[in-house]
Amino acid sequence: EMPLVCLTDFEVQAREQLSKTSWDFINGGADEGITREDNIAAFKKIRLRPRYLRDVSEVDTRTTILGEEISAPIGISPTGFHTIACPDGEMSTARAAQAAGVCYITSTFASCSFEDIVAAAPGGLRWFQLYVQSDQQLNKQLVQRVESLGFKALVVTVDAPVVGNRRHDIRNGLDLKRNLMLTDLRSPALAYSRDSNFLQRNSIPSLQTSAPSPYFSWNDLSWFQSLTRLPIILKGILTKEDAELAVKHNVQGIVVSNHGGRQLDEVPSSIDALTEVVTAVNGKLEVYLDGGVRTGNDVLKALALGAKCVFLGRPILWGLACKGEHGVRDVLNILKNELHTSMALTGCRSIAEINRNLIQFSRL
Ligand SMILES: Cc1cc2nc3c(=O)[nH]c(=O)nc-3n(C[C@H](O)[C@H](O)[C@H](O)COP(=O)(O)O)c2cc1C
């Protein structure tokens, strides 16, 4: 067996492990996949300006997000249905995140109950990703339930008023709305516990059929703020206009994201949209990024351009598909080690020393 030494190695092996339908669901983008590819390519256009002779014998990757300490500015983006990648699903993800000392944003569409996820790793830092539902009562129940379970923030996804057009899923006959996830997505190559009914195990049975609400708008935010003391983070903001509205509506954070290129195609890559958002919020709230982060240099670049932390979507599912909990641990540790090396090689001894001078703007 080939050792898995970088995140791309996990991608190659995960593809071999998963059924075509599962792979396409995880890997795919919307429409022509332009943004999905741009997310990776845009990082590769950026060049670094290293500083030397700064005694990098000790490099500290620790930082904070909303006041909580994390071992590195790397976390887990919300992705649904982890049982398609490994039998223990989100429980494995939660354990790996806790072991690595990073934040795990749990998806509304988790395939394990939120209670089970919390019980699997009681000491881990978790945020809850909310797809706002059309049913207000359900929104209220959900928010209060995750708050009492110890989730530390509400990550409200804003870029999915309707579901993007994913051609592979349509060709493969995958219909999330009709609960075909279980039968169609489970790889026959993997040993799943067949007795555990997906719908019963799911946290909110009715949620499987209820898509995100297309009605949700800026005016509804204050209702959520009145419901909970949790900080609110908006995930999927790409423009200065929306960033300014986020500040005006007193949210605590923004995840610059295009949903991994799975929603509106032909929007900017995350790393290209970052500066516009960082400039607009002018330090009034924390800005994070997800989309296309695959190496330590990518993390360094996002931080240099103003992100407080980056999050990983697909690489976590690759880790799960290859080696379950240990695969996710490996993915996180590989990226943390790469960041450590990138920092040492650019002369950054702490996260605070990462700044715009690391970026070669003349080339962009
Ligand atoms: C299989 C899959 C499922 C996802 N499910 C969700 C979800 O439930 N909620 C959400 O806000 N974003 C979801 N996303 C988007 C991710 O949170 C994230 O924005 C994206 O994957 C980041 O890009 P990356 O995969 O290049 O790291 C999903 C992405 C993938 C690939």
Image (cartoon, rainbow, N blue to C red):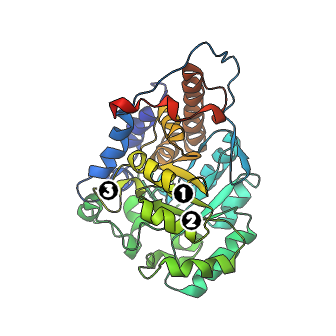
**Nearer the observer, disc 1 or disc 3?**
1
From the Cβ of disc 2, is ligand 1 less than 8 Å away? Answer: no
What's the CA distance linking mark 1 and mark 3? 20 Å
What residue is shown at x 59% (from left), y 80% (from top)? Answer: 139
Residue that badge 3 annotates: 267
Taking the image as drawn, is residue 113 in sight? yes
Disc 1 secondary structure class:
helix
Q: Is residue 16 left or right of residue 59?
A: left
Q: Which residue, given by chain and number where applicable, does mark 1 sit on?
A: 281
Mark pair 3, 2: CA separation: 22 Å
Q: Which residue is disc 2 drawn over?
A: 247
Q: Nearer the viewer, mark 3 or mark 2?
A: 2
Q: Secondary structure at mark 2?
A: helix
Front-most of residues 109 and 144: 144
Q: Secondary structure at mark 3?
A: loop
- Judging depth in this view, the residue of 72 and 78 nearest the camera is 72
Q: 332 or 291, which is in the foreground? A: 291
Q: Position of residue 182 (x, y in %)?
A: 44, 65
Name the residue located 48 percent from the left edge and 45 percent from the top edge: 321
Query: Which residue is at a point 61% across and 79% down the rendered structure image?
Result: 222
Q: Position of residue 359 (x, y in %)?
A: 46, 31
Q: Give the position of the C terminus as an image quadrant.
A: top left
Label 3 CB, ligand 1: below 8 Å?
Answer: no
* Label 3 neighbour load within 10 Å: few <14, some 14-19, many 20+: some
Contact, CB < 8 Å: mark 2 with mark 1? yes
| Amino acid type, callout 3 | Val
